[in-house]
Image (cartoon, rainbow, N blue to C red):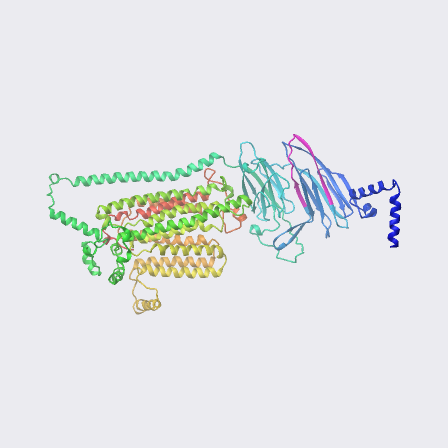
Amino acid sequence: MLFRSHWKSRYKTISGAADCWWRPWLVLLWWSCLTQSTCGSGALEESKHLVIQREGEFDVTYNDTVTSENQTIYAFNHTVSWNKTEGVRVSVDVLSQNLKSPILFVVRQKQAVLSFQVPLILRGLYQRKYPYNHLGRTLCQPPTKSASETQYFFVDVSTLSNQGTNYQLRVSRVESFTLQTDKTFSFTASPSQPQYFKYVFPEGVDTVIVKVSSDMNFPCSVMSIQDIQCPVYDLDNNVAFIGMYQTMTKKGAITVQRKDFPSNSFYVVVVVKTEDEACGGPLRFYPLRPDELIDAGNRSKILDVVVSPAIKSEVYVMGMLFCLGIFLSFYLLTLLVACLHNKRAKKRELFENLADTSPAETGKTPASPNEYGSLNSTVSSEAVTDGAPSLDSAASADNYGYLERPLENVGRSRQESLSSIEEDDYDTLDDINSDKNIVRTKKYLCVSDLSRKDKRVLSKKYQIYFWNIATIAVFYALPVIQLVITYQTVVNVTGNQDICYYNFMCAHPLGALSAFNNILSNLGYVMLGLLFLLIVLKRDIVHNRALSCQDINALECGIPKHFGLFYAMGTALMMEGLLSACYHVCPNYTNFQFDTSFMYMIAGLCMLKLYQKRHPDINASAYTAYACLAAVIFFSVLGVVFGRGNTVFWIIFSVIHILATLLLSTQLYYMGRWRLDSGVLRRMVYIVYTDCIRQCSGPMYIDRMVLLVMGNIVNWSLAAYGLIERPNDFASYLLAIAICNLLLYFAFYIIMKLRSGERIQCLALVCILFTAVVWGFALYFFFQGLSTWQKTPAESREHNRDCILLSFFDDHDIWHFLSSIAMFGSFLVLLTMDDDLDTVQRDKIYVF
């Protein structure tokens, strides 16, 4: 209380004095505290902190020392003109070791502030820390509107360390800061010394390709395209913040369009990463103690950058016209062949009419009414027996236990609606089943033995193939299109070009699509698939007209005509084009099954069609076939996701592959007349004992046995290869299995056809030779491998190459062209291969 009253009395005395002389000095002292940042620290603290200002000069190395008690400010100025851009680079090197506190460098410019510490700590995986004592940073260039302007910038150096820290500072001009069109520029970069350069679009150039290359795979680096703005994100931990970017080892390329940069210019930024894991390289260091610093070693990389004009709009037009011209020529060629065929048919019909002239001209007597009635009765009988053997083979049919169905048992008209016909109406009686066991187990079979079901029933059965695949296509394509649109949007928004595995050396954008040429080249699948459907439709109409006219050749001769599988094949080819185009919107390992799913469909449908030609009654139903193909696609997805290096998966798949091969072989050998039940093992042992041990007897069906033995050798070899090598591209491996089986069966079919005395007509032979040549060239371009999603995006870009056709299409586009033509040719081979049998009775056509 005494002290308080004493203080109050003193305060009153002082404050009561009029015009106190010390007030101005108190205000001056307070203002000095604010300006010198020493308020509250006393006069002693103010005298210890020292700010040193220097006039900086370019290309001069400053060796100085900084402590917590002094701060150095370097002032620089340089002249900037609107028609010439010079870069300014700040290089810093810390000479002291074992620093407790880093040195902070702050560069203050007209429109930006750049700050960094030395040592610079960059983080890798598992939060590993890599220190860098030598730094080099390029300053961004604020735009200027005047012809010439002097700009100032300041470099502030400070630290909180009490001990003196030696450093070197050098500010220099970058003479080659602006890149020139089609001129290669070489430079060196490291994680702590990133580089970036400016490029200005010249007049008349709207699109350019920026290519960065190096002779060194590692260290891993990142190239980025950024707008002209400050700050420039040029460190490993922030380069992905804006713009377009991609990792690279030896190659990197980004297509840049003028419309994306309002300033008509952009920065090309190259950053070397602290670790190589993003580019597929090894991890040199494993997780250590959290606070331990790791010496990254020398991670400098020499790179070259060149900016070249991309193609013009005229090249886009030429590419599209070229693509349309190729496939429209097939339409014209088909129309020409059809006209020639119709002309020959008319000539043949004219000769037949001349041969059937009046009796006065030919010397023949007219047929009696009884003869006409007998002829009509014969045609009617053949029209309703639905593939029954002819009268010439009646005796042999009796020997096989086959009895021709009497006419009174088949009272239905051929024009009856298909909706009232069911397969079970003709295929459920015990005597029919007994007849199957007798007929199908004969040593030598004819097509008439396996084409006994009603044609209307089979047509309805095989039309389900088309309707099912059309339904599958709709439900499959819609989410695929939605997903790839999302992928493309993500790429355009984030700028992360590592999401998609393009051939960046030949990826021509159009609108929101990054690689329009890879999408356009799939047009052939759609156009040729549609053309094949039109050809099949024409044949279907002609065949139906022949049936309605009671043509004996259409009723009882040749391979039974069922077009449902052909319609399904044409639809599958069109869907392959659509889904391949969707896949190439953003190709990567997560959507590769879009490109291969309908390839499995096409291979499966072709094998089913080959089998159906000689076995129309016992071919698989659409539901069974598509269920098996769905299982194949299921394993394809599992293999892509889990199959890489997974031994357990490969063992399971190889076992399933071998078991499926054995089951299918048994089904084909016995024509479906066997049962998979609890007694199957007992029957197998009995057959082996009686045929191989008790008596050495050869197989009853030699031809089928040869095919199945070869098929088992091929499939067991493929299963062993997969189990031993475990290829990364499981989807392509699975597709190779399907193609090998298809080629094996097709070769067997051709050989057996020639061996049976049948011939191949000229049109089918031309299609076979043409298709074989085109497949050879197509596979050559397929194996060029311009990109691969089995590796990292940076490693995939090592395979990128320039366009080779019209400066618009690359090797993979040519694969699309040739493979679509080859598939179309293969379908035509299946369609026309047995045209030579159209006038041969079915009981004289062998089954194999």
Most common SS among magenta residues: strand
Q: Is residue 846 left or right of residue 713?
A: left
Q: Which region is colored magenta? A: 135-157
Q: Give the image quarter of residue 293.
A: bottom right
Q: Give 727 or 35, whichever is nearer the viewer.
A: 35
Q: x%, y% of residue 641?
A: 49, 55
Q: Is residue 173 left or right of residue 380?
A: right
Give the residue displayed 20% in from the left and 39% down from the top.
350
Q: x%, y% of residue 25?
A: 85, 41
Q: x%, y% of residue 234?
A: 62, 44
Quadrant location of the N terminus?
bottom right
Q: Give the image quarter of residue 770.
A: top left
From this view, report whether residue 305 is shown above or below residue 386: above
Q: Report if residue 379 lies within the magenta region.
A: no
Q: x%, y% of residue 639?
A: 46, 56
Q: Is residue 534 left or right of residue 204?
A: left
Q: Is residue 120 visible?
A: yes
Q: Give 431 or 662, whichever is nearer the viewer.
A: 431
